[in-house]
Amino acid sequence: MTELYDVAILGSGFEGSLLGTILAYNGARVLILDAGTHPRFALGESTVRHTFRMLKIIAERFGVPELKEKFYSAEHLHKHVSGGFGVKKNFGFILHHQGQHQNPHEATQFVIPPYREGHEAHLYRQDTDAFLTYTAIHHGATVKYSTRVKEVDAGKDCVFIKSEKDETFRARFIADASGGGHVLSRMWDLRDNPPRVKLQTRCLFTHMIDVKPYDDLNLPHGIPKAPQRWYEGTCHHMFDGGWVWVIPFNNRPGSTNPVISVGVSFDIRKFPKPANLTPQQEWLEFLDRFPSIKEQFQDAKPVRDWVSSDRLQTSCKQTVGDRWALMAGGAGSGFFDALFSRGLAGSMEVTHALAARILKALKEDDFSAGQFEYVARLHENLLQNNDKLVRSAYTSFRDFDLWNAWFRVWVLGVGLGDLKLASTYRRYLRTKDDSLLPDAEEPMGLFFSQHRGFQTLFNAAVAKMDEVEEGRADTKSAANYIFDLIRNANFTPAAHNLGEPECHAINSGKPIIGLKTLLWLFTSAPPDIKNLSLGLLGLGRPQAAAR
Ligand SMILES: Cc1cc2nc3c(=O)[nH]c(=O)nc-3n(C[C@H](O)[C@H](O)[C@H](O)COP(=O)(O)OP(=O)(O)OC[C@H]3O[C@@H](n4cnc5c(N)ncnc54)[C@H](O)[C@@H]3O)c2cc1C
């Protein structure tokens, strides 16, 4: 009989190796199987506050020293993991129209203040994923590379796994972290056909060198003014029907990596996949339509082959069962569309919730589906909220005023969600009370979806965007409607200028904005927001109204 592991994990990417690290550190016998080897390319390079905040919570809850000391902020990663990561000081959004040079008034920037957590990062995934895999091995996990899994059978007493080389393995539980490999959902026919989401996008992507900073181009109408250089953040070039990402790894003093991640995402209904073009040809044809974007890539050279995907969105009929669970990539909730860089943040929420439940199941020797039901709900909330958020953004790309309005809805959700998570983290540090943690309540689905006020605002704004998409509302009146929703929200301070269409940069890190926000908190903020802010000092308990 082959050795019986406690947990088998399919895939040694970010999700699989992080889960393996947590479980191995906490005493489980872990087997990680991967079709490839490290180092290897992976998407999911741009982080958001939510990603690192969840990593901090994971580090505290599960106690893994390497996560606490080396892996919970961009600064830590630059110092301890790799010199090959870039910095992300802002989210930049620049709107383009076919056949025209860019109008510099049509751009928005969301500044990531350096306070508390530092800036965000552009992760060169081959380095993070290798680091996490080696950490899992250090804590006792067994890793088998070049082991493509072809059969999995979840029996009554254990799970049987067979590789393409006919090796067999056994484990008490299996977690599918195979990302876009979707191993279990393909093998067990778990996928919905079609997926139960509305967004329909595909992408082309590669890594390049010699991409010029957009800030340094000499364009006929100039470069949009912003608090920070566009090149120091994740830059989104939006157009009607899609957007281009520019994620530099070479934009930080001290970076040793000349590479820039580049991709373009298309709404399939507007840009169907061409049958007669190579991915590189499609990219060059695309550049011919957008002269300002083309300038940025005048000297650029790919350092690996372009990849052209099919539709990115997937969903599953079932995501957990007796002795098994899908992680975010495999379930489709974490591999949705690159817009707003939310994939890894979702992966962290799923890893956090699943690790806690696997450790409990190991202790109780109970691996029934009910133990993992929360993870299924989390997948669903991630999937549905991402669909609403991202498809509405694609709708908005047709008109700057509409984008300008939708941008605020996203910023508001991110800001409140971050406040909530930061508050939770501080309170947890003080109390070590697991009942305060995100998986002790209805899943957020990545932003402040449990807050009654924000939930109502968000759903009303999504409904209006759907009306635009279906031709039942015009873009200008929809933009006005959304701005009114934001101006009438009592749970956000006016100091952040979210209700001001003329203010194209949201920079909550400015001292004057901080002071005005403090004043608002003491004088007119609703009690639930006051309570969350108190949480930043580690004080108080969560209030029902803030959930
Ligand atoms: C176009 C696009 C862009 C994205 N950009 C961002 C972003 O900027 N920021 C962000 O946070 N998220 C982003 N994401 C999401 C992000 O890519 C995922 O959340 C993240 O990569 C999940 O990591 P993972 O470990 O699940 O998957 P992966 O890193 O893909 O790892 C999967 C592993 O499984 C292995 N595997 C596959 N099949 C088998 C098999 N049969 N047997 C054994 N092993 C197998 C593979 O070899 C691989 O090592 C993006 C997603 C897409 C689609």
Image (cartoon, rainbow, N blue to C red):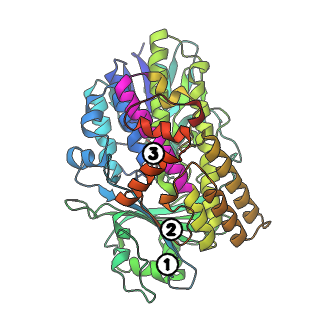
Q: Is residue 336 above or below residue 209?
A: above
Q: Amino acid at mark 2?
A: Pro
Q: Nearer the viewer, mark 2 or mark 1?
A: 1
- Which residue is located at x 43 percent, y 36 percent? 534
Which amino acid lies under the numbered mark 1 shown in the image of this protein?
Leu
The foreground one among 446 and 205 is 446
Residue type of the residue flagged with mark 3:
Leu
Left or right of 93 on screen, residue 141 = left
**Alpha-carbon span between mark 1 and mark 3:** 29 Å
Using the image as rendered, state which of residue 130 and residue 152 is in the foreground: 130
Query: Label 3: which residue?
Result: 344
| Mark positioned earlier in the residue sequence (3 or 2) | 2
Q: Residues within 10 Å of mark 2 (few under 14, many from 20)?
A: many
Image marks 3 and 2: residues in contact by CB distance under 8 Å: no
Q: Nearer the viewer, mark 3 or mark 2?
A: 3
Q: Secondary structure at mark 2?
A: helix
Of the numbered discs in the image, which one, if any, rests on residue 279? 2
Crowding at dot 1, Cα within 10 Å, few <14 / some 14-19 / many 20+, comes out as some
Q: Which residues are magenta?
A: 410-433
